[in-house]
Amino acid sequence: MFELLLLCPEERVEVFSEALDALDALSVSVEDADAQTPAEQALFGEPGMPPPKEGWQRSRVVALFAEQAQADEAATLLQAQDFFEGCQLLGVRRVEDQDWVRLTQSQFAPVEITPEFWIVPTWHEVPAQARRTIRLDPGLAFGTGTHPTTRMCLRWIANHGLHDQRVLDYGCGSGILAIGAAKHGAQVIDAVDIDEAAVTSTRLNAEANGVQLNAGLPELAQGQYQTVLANILATPLKVLAPLLCAHVQAGGMLVLAGILERQAEELQQAYAPWLALQVSDAEDGWILMTARKA
């Protein structure tokens, strides 16, 4: 494998990416050329939403090619284009062969939710102190237990228990919260998502963990539940407020995550006509908000 490295201004990132894709690059990535310097910039935007800019003021574009001849030819062709003016070729370099599967796996270690409850990738041994585990590998759907929002939801489930409850996981992603609910005694679990790939992922992960649940598109959610879980993002959570609140039965709990600390008040206002949200947990700038229906 060979990397072609280019330096270009923010406004050229998109055209370079498209050109490299047309030149059969295996992948194209964009980095801040000023990273780890006083000139480093952050691309602000709510996590999971598109960034407001395509790149940094000085962006390093890295394209991966199978052969050096392909990388050299791409460099020659790009330098001949009008849009290359003001840009710089940083070079072509060999990428040393590695065991990419092993390298990827090394980045995902078991995740402690509580001392007795862990998320464990299938290639790892289960920690000796674990009494409950979810076996889960990184996949296409969101939710591996490494993000603070997921950990807080699972921690809430572990600390409260859902024995014999009917539970809804709205925006289930990988199904990790639904599986966590099953591991903590929930009797009937509906897990829904607008993404069919997430529904498939949830079914496969549930089977791998030996738990029973119903996974499907949002219309699967019917009636009321004793616990409604939704780990999405603040904007869709505000839109979904009347729907999610309607699914919570009297005396039941609503548990919301995917919310930044600075968004607490706007979520409280959005849900005020139905439920009084409060902050129940916080981690790394994220919060968990819960409410009990009267």
Image: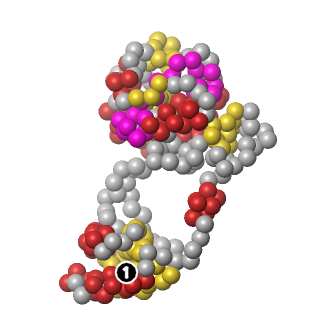
Residue most extreme to the right: 128
Which residue extends farthest left?
82
- Front residue (pair 138, 158): 138
Task: Give the x, y percent position of residue 28.
Answer: 38, 69
Which region is colored magenta?
180-199
Using the image, determine if residue 120 lies above or below residue 278.
Answer: below
Residue at the image position 55 percent from the left and 32 percent from the top: 206
Q: Say how many tags the image has.
A: 1
Q: Is 186 a magenta residue?
A: yes
Residue 290 is situated, as x and y percent measured from the top left of the image, at: 50, 28
Residue indicated by mark 1 = 70
Left or right: residue 186 compared with residue 256: right
Q: Quick check: 235 left or right of 252?
A: left
Which secondary structure lies at badge 1?
Answer: helix
Which residue is drawn at the image coordinates 24% and 87% (left, top)? 80
Q: Residue 269 appears in which quarter of the rendering?
A: top left
Residue 50, picture quadrant: bottom left
Q: Amino acid at mark 1?
A: Gln
In the image, residue 169 sits, relative to residue 80, either above or below, namely above
Q: Measured from the top left, where is residue 11 in percent x and y?
A: 26, 72
Residue at 43 percent across and 79 percent down: it is 67
Q: Is residue 35 visible?
A: yes
Near mark 1 (Cα within 10 A), the count class, few <14, some 14-19 or many ≥20, is some
Q: Quadrant of residue 33?
A: bottom left
Name the foreground residue: 26 vs 163: 26
Residue drawn 38% across the image and 18% down it: 222
- In this view of the protein, which residue sits in the foreground, 255 or 162? 162
**Residue 38 is one of the magenta-drawn residues:** no
Residue 130 place in picture, x, y as percent = 74, 37
Q: Using residue 151 as the reference point, say whether residue 258 is left or right of it.
A: left
